[in-house]
Image (cartoon, coloured by chain):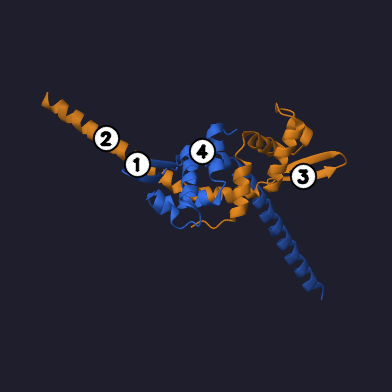
Chain colours: A blue, B orange
Amino acid sequence: MVECNQDALDLVFSAVADPTRRAILQALARKPATITEIAKPFPVSLNAVSKHVMVLERAGLIRREVLGREHHCTLEPYPLREATAWLDHYRRFWNVRLDALERYVARKMKAASKGESRHGRSH
Amino acid sequence: MVECNQDALDLVFSAVADPTRRAILQALARKPATITEIAKPFPVSLNAVSKHVMVLERAGLIRREVLGREHHCTLEPYPLREATAWLDHYRRFWNVRLDALERYVARKMKAASKGESRHGRSH
């Protein structure tokens, strides 16, 4: 089935398994930022944010450029594509189940409306 | 942007951040199985597989039914839908980049063919 780089998937899924790291990616999806800018909205230390950025960088999700004393971070979305490709395989499962549910509801509604019209005729 | 249950996302992404757990999900996507059947192809102990199954169960990705001494496991794909929804937001980023790359290549090819035809005329 899905052929993916397993180590890359481990790193990406681990990286996005944390709400602060997901929030950092969401912020960088709006625009590139320095570590200080990234850290501003979070109630954790600059050091903690810096560690989260390192995890994201190791997963290939952030590119860091050092300009003087500033570390500029940019979102690198490509590793997320591989993660999405892996998950896409399972899309058919919930689609199949939703189709089945839809058919079941349609059947029930048809049966109910038939019952009602029969009920109407008998009175 | 994407509104998701953060705790559920933490659990799901952590659960799929391991190659054995991803392989277990892939096996259960083919058909439901007992823990012993799940464990068979893996070079790790039944106990280790059982722990992986517990992690997947906690993330809501596996439903377990105990029938006598057998634990029957079934894939529950819905939590993966939420994970996919979160990742879908980033789909546009690589799409945008691929579109830009496509336009760049088309421009280059057009320029190259113009250059060639000019070159052809001058001789």
Q: Tell me the residue at 49%/44% (across/down).
A: A51
Q: Which mark is residue A82?
A: 4
In the shown orientation, is residue A54 left or right of residue B79? left
Amino acid type assigned to the residue bearing label 1 in the image: Val
Give the quadrant of residue B31: top right
Q: Secondary structure at mark 3?
A: strand
Have a look at marks 4 and 3 and say if they share a chain: no
- Say which of B22 and B77 sits in front: B22
Q: Is residue A24 above or below residue B38?
A: below
Amino acid type of disc 4? Glu
Residue of label 1: A66
Residue visible at 54% across and 58% down? B3
Residue depicted at 56% across the width and 41% down the height: A14
Q: Mark 2 or 3 closer to N-term?
A: 3
Would you name the residue on which mark 3 appears?
B64
**Image coords of residue B72 (percent x, y):** 79, 40
Q: Quote the CA–CA distance across marks 2 and 3.
A: 57 Å
Locate residue B2, reporting x and y percent: 51, 56
Q: Are marks 1 and 2 in contact (CB under 8 Å)?
A: no
Nearer to us of marks 4 and 1 is 1
